[in-house]
Amino acid sequence: MLALTKIALDLDAAVRLGVTALGHDTEAVRTIPAEEVEAAVLDRSRNQQRKFRRLSVADVQRALDSGEPEPEPTPDTEPTTPPDEPSAGPSGSNGTSGE
C-alpha cells in the first residue's frame, strides 16, 4: 500500500514540483517551458461561479524561476558503489583462488 504524507507547499513550490514531475517519465528527462504549462488553483473566495483561477504564463514562469533549481540527473549523481566485481589487490589478485 502506498503511504501518503501530507506536505504543505507554497504555490511556487507546488508548480515547480508538478512541472518537474511531468518532465520525468519513462523517456529522457525533459524541461517543460512555462508556455506549455496549463495550471489552475482553487480559490474559494472568488465571487464567480467558477472557483478555479487559471495561472498565467507569467505566474508559471515566476514559480519556475523562484526557489532552488532542481538538480539535473548526471552520471555523477548515480550511486558510486561499483557492481559486484572483486577488488584487485596489489598483485592483481583478490586473495581467492577464482575457481
Image: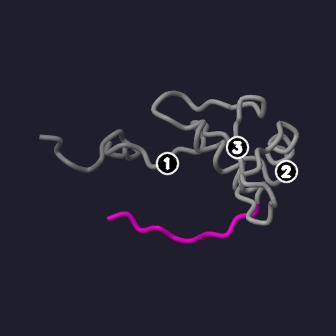
As for residue 57 lying within the magenta part, the answer is no
Mark in front: 2 vs 3: 3
Q: Which residue is mark 1?
A: 79
Q: Nearer the viewer, residue 31 or 10?
A: 10
Mark 3 falls on what kind of element?
loop
Q: Is 5 a magenta residue?
A: yes
Whether residues under marks 3 and 1 lie with C-beta atoms below 8 angstroms apart, the answer is no
Q: Amino acid at mark 1?
A: Pro
42 to the left or right of 82: right
Sequence-earlier tag: 2 or 3: 3
Q: Residues within 10 Å of mark 2 (few under 14, many from 20)?
A: few
Give the distance between the C-alpha atoms of the residues marked 3 and 1, in whole angstroms.
35 Å
Amino acid type assigned to the residue bearing label 3 in the image: Ala
First to last magenta residue range: 1-10
Estimate the x, y position of residue 1 in percent, counting from the top left: 31, 65
Q: Where does the C terminus fall, quadrant-wise?
A: top left
Residue that numbered label 3 is attached to:
39
* Residue visible at 78% across and 29% down in the picture: 35
* Cα–Cα gap, marks 1 and 2: 29 Å
Which callout, 3 or 1, points at the residue further toward the start of the chain?
3
